[in-house]
Image (cartoon, grey):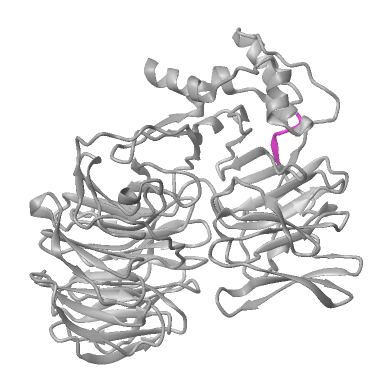
Amino acid sequence: MKTLSYLILFTLLCTIGIYVWQGAVAQTSTPPILQIDPGGHKALILDVAFTPDGRYLVSAGQDKLIRVWNIETGQTVRTLRGQIGAGHEGKIYAMALSPDGRWLAAGGMFHKSNPVEGSVIRLYNFASGQLVALLNGHTDVVAALAFSPDSRFLVSGGGDKNAILWDMDSKAKALDSILSGHTDSIYAVAFTPDSQRVVTGSDDHTLRLWQVSDGKRLATLTGHTDKVRSVAISPQDGTIASGSWDYTIRLWDGQTGRFLKTLTNQGTKVGSLSFSPDGRYLVSGVSKGKECHVWSIPDGQEIVTYRGHDNIVIATAVSADGQWVATGGGANQEIHLWSLRDGHLKQRFRGVGASTWAVAFSADGRELAWGNTWTQSSPTNRRPLEYRFALPKAEALDSRAALDSRAALDSRAALDSRALVPRRLTEGGRGFIRAQDGLGDWTLRTRRSGNYGYQAILDIRLHNRTKASIERGRTDGYAHLSYTFTPNGQRIISGGVHGVLTAYNREGDKLGNYVGHTGTVWTVAVSPDGRLLVSGSADQTVRLWDVDSRENLLTLFHGNNGEWVAWTPTGHYTASSQGDNMVGWQINRGVDKAADYVKAAQLAKQLNRPDIVADTVRLGSANQALEKAGLTDFSLEQLIGESLTTD
């Protein structure tokens, strides 16, 4: 079973064994949260599962959504939305579907404001999609889940170093025994075929074998030399397979925990493991790299290498009939369905969006450009630019605050029509200015930190001597993955993991954050006049910022189907004919309730305002644009609330 690769841990206090069944009082809702819905995942996919009948796939990831896919059509047929918040709140790090198809469990970073609810597991009735229970017990993020083969038990593991067993026959009540003893976080769990034992894998480099009936530890499995992030158990003979960041897959006896053999060294970190139903084959994914492998058991011969993904794969599953493998990953968060026997690709499950890998400004600052193609051979800041977007001209536009007729609305939409419309870039990016890692005698260089990798430290250098260094860790983006000087050389702007985008001075002091991205910021650039910043992210958006105020002025989503939408922080937007169907607002209804979702298209009459979008960019302020439009009392929350009441 796969588990979380990169995790920000925080500690919350809670009481073991508390559960909330449907009917508990919901918490107050939060303001509407804008969400892109490109029809597929837009962040790292962490779990996939086949339904027992083989007709559907279920997937979950860091975009805070669970999607149910029709295997034949490749389309999403259901989206499950739970309470989310800013930052990590609501990210799903583990998901499991019971073998009888009755229950769906999801764990992650759910609700941070109340300690008792800080690490809940959401339990759904899969047939109806109804959220029926919250399972409280962990005191840190839940990162691993598995149901027993008889569907009677659920086991969960997390950052609190503990595992908990839940009895599904007793309204998912926690059993009395906490499976404790690991000295680091648990990111992998699995049951033996008889549902009598459970295995846990941990960052402490060990696995432990437990008895379900009384929580007794039966064995400690040692031998790995790095984090154990994946565990799978053969459905036939109970052989345990473990995958580690030490690059190895090891086999163990499922009865005693005795070490059997090192199956293979796959040459990179093992991200996920799944057995075929007959126990003859083992599928492995990678936490670093892009290949998936099928190994024969027990000899360890590689029979298939699947190379369809272009980046890491840490979610794998095998269908009940043993014919198909589902793998989730890659640069654009796709799920691939391929043959276990020969690796032939049958279906892709994906949306119309893609990560943004390159951004730039034109030399005159009147256009910005971006690209969505990931190329391994190119340096990060030299990936291709593919589209351009003209910014509004400096001269003022007349606002049309009181237009009500359809003709007037069409007239308003035609304002400054050549600006704010994506067009294909045909010149290959010549004349566009990208990130500047050198300015005069000043240069920027990254280097490795022992804790967080090869780009964790950014050195600010003058005459090839380091004048200051900025080191990142798990609370501020892990690494410097994109960075640039501003044109005057006085500031450095750097992007990292989890949407971190920060400004520093040349002494390395933090000046402030640009808040808005929800995925890794892969690329940045500053306009020639130093006024605007453009950034591109794994969250599939391009964002435009005021450099000084750090206000987000505009966010653009451009689908590979040609549809697009660009919006301001106030919710006003301009879009292609169907673009406003790809963005909307989630309305939380409480931690124990499903969330509502309203598409922007439902509010087009009030929010389709190209004039306000243009003025926001031109004036450098969303509030000033509203004031110019005569909408100083505008309330997006009220507008959405009225829409839900009307519906």
Q: Answer with left or right where residue 603 lies relative to residue 56.
A: right
Say which residue appears at 33% left-offset and 42% top-offset: 80
Say which residue appears at 13% left-offset and 83% top-offset: 255
Number of residue marks: 0
Task: Report if residue 526 lies within the magenta region.
Answer: no
Residue most extreme to the right: 440
Secondary structure mainly formed by the magenta segment: loop
- Which corner quadrant of the image does residue 187 belong to? bottom left
Image quadrant occupied by the N terminus: bottom left
Name the spot of residue 482 as percent of width and height, x first: 68, 61
Residue interval drawn in magenta = 418-423
Name the spot of residue 27 as percent of width and height, x first: 33, 35
Q: Answer with left or right where residue 282 lies relative to residue 449.
A: left
Say which residue appears at 22% left-offset and 36% top-offset: 24
Give the answer, above or below, for where 69 lies relative to 159: above
Say which residue appears at 71% left-offset and 20% top-offset: 627
Residue 139 visible from this viewpoint: yes
Task: Report if residue 420 lies within the magenta region.
Answer: yes
Name the spot of residue 272 as percent of width and height, x first: 36, 71
Image quadrant occupied by the C terminus: top left
Give the answer, above or below, for where 62 lies relative to 186: above
- Which corner quadrant of the image does residue 54 belong to? bottom left
